[in-house]
Image (spheres, rainbow, N blue to C red):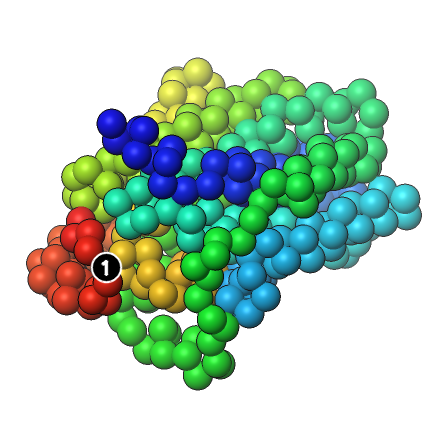
Amino acid sequence: MRAKGFLKSGHIPTLFSSFLYFDLSFMVWVILGPLGVAIAKSLHLDAAQKGFMVATPLLAGAVLRVVFGVLVDHIGPKRAGIIGQLIVLAGLGLAWLLGIHSYSQVLCLAVVLGVAGASFAVALPLASRWYPPEHQGLALGIAGAGNSGTALAALFAPTLAKTYGWTNVIGLAALPLALAFVVYLVFAKDSPTRPPAKKAAEYLDVLRQADCWWLMALYGVTFGGFSGLASSLTIYFNGEYHLDPVIAGFFTAACVFAGSAVRPVGGALADRLGGVNTLTVVYGIAALALFGASFHLAGPALALGVLMLAMMALGAGNGAVFQLAPQRFGREIGVVTGLVGAMGGIGGFYLASTLGLARQLTGSFQPGFLGFAALAIGAQFALLALKSRWRAVWPTLRGAGDAVPVRV
């Protein structure tokens, strides 16, 4: 009955278009990670430069998510998505035609790829606005499962780079993105209940509310961990266990698929059990797994299992955070999605860059893993302190027309 109600409550073509757009945009957003070994060899990069290279798209995406969150509120998510996809397609095409010959040039490409990461701030509101509150967790979990595109990059990019060269992979990546663009143009539609555009002061009002900052911090850990690992694990498995880049890419893809697959599960569990309860558990699991991964484990297979567990916990947490966000900020979901998503990108930049820096300075990835495990524990304790207030206050903040009770 619940599934039937979900299917009837929204707009499935838009949900699918959001997922595909998000999925293939995320594929190109993190593509420098799976190509990192080949790029580093070609451009003679050290460990810190590799870490910063794969982290730069995450930081650019973080900043641009705020920009696209504002665009979503002013021109609608569909138009904002069209603009973003055209920019990324043009950037990939130019990089392939002109070539990339220096570290500074690859960083310029990384900034353009950040526009693909900003798809988060478009795809989720596009899907969310079609669904009632009781189905928000599942709808956003399905649309958000597009972060599985990071696994496509890890799965195919190293093999294609070995066969055709890494610069040609940049051009090849534009082909599936173009297909997703056509699907998006044909099937995606803006919800008829789209709220009116807000004034600049109204965006600042959201930032004056502590709950917005808390949601940003929570997502900075869940999605930051997910995206940071997705961008770095090919380099990690190659550097720590000396795996061939193709095999390291397969290992990375397994981790990303595991994390992406459970994102809808995390949203659905949050719908049923509450977002706070779900997040409290997954932060603990993620912290333990990251702590374990910080040690040089007995072999790459064991490291794979531990990191898959970490990614599954973080992926479920991504879905749970976005079960909470529309309940607290339903009318401001466009800008809040951009802000929360931006912090997720910043978290990913922190993890990816610190893993590379730790390797450069200490010869080990351990300090980077331990630092992020500590953040997960901190988020868990913050939730325990916030839980009572949220459950008491959030239902009173709903509008008179919101008949569905809040499940925090």
Amino acid residing under circle 1: Asp
* Residue to which mark 1 is pinned: 402
Write the residue at 26% across / 45% down.
Answer: 134
* 32 and 76: which is toward the camera: 76
Horizontal side of 360 relative to 287 (left or right) equals right
Give the answer, above or below, for where 198 lies relative to 33: below
Quadrant where the N terminus is found in the figure: top left
Horizontal side of 287 relative to 192 (left or right) equals left
Quick one: which residue is furthest to the right in this view?
98
Write the residue at 23% across / 46% down.
Answer: 275
Q: Quadrant of residue 64?
A: bottom right
Numbered-mark total: 1
Horizontal side of 373 relative to 81 (left or right) equals left
Q: Residues within 10 Å of mark 1 (few under 14, many from 20)?
A: some
Residue 72 visible? The answer is yes
Look at the numbered disc 1 and give the secondary structure of its residue. Answer: loop
Write the residue at 48% across / 57% down.
Answer: 192
Picture coordinates of residue 180 (x, y %)?
Answer: 67, 37
Q: In which quarter of the image is residue 35?
A: top right
Quick one: which residue is furthest to the bottom in this view?
201
Picture coordinates of residue 100 (x, y %)?
Answer: 83, 46
Picture coordinates of residue 220 (x, y %)?
Answer: 39, 54
* 118 and 189: which is toward the camera: 189
* 154 and 359: which is toward the camera: 154
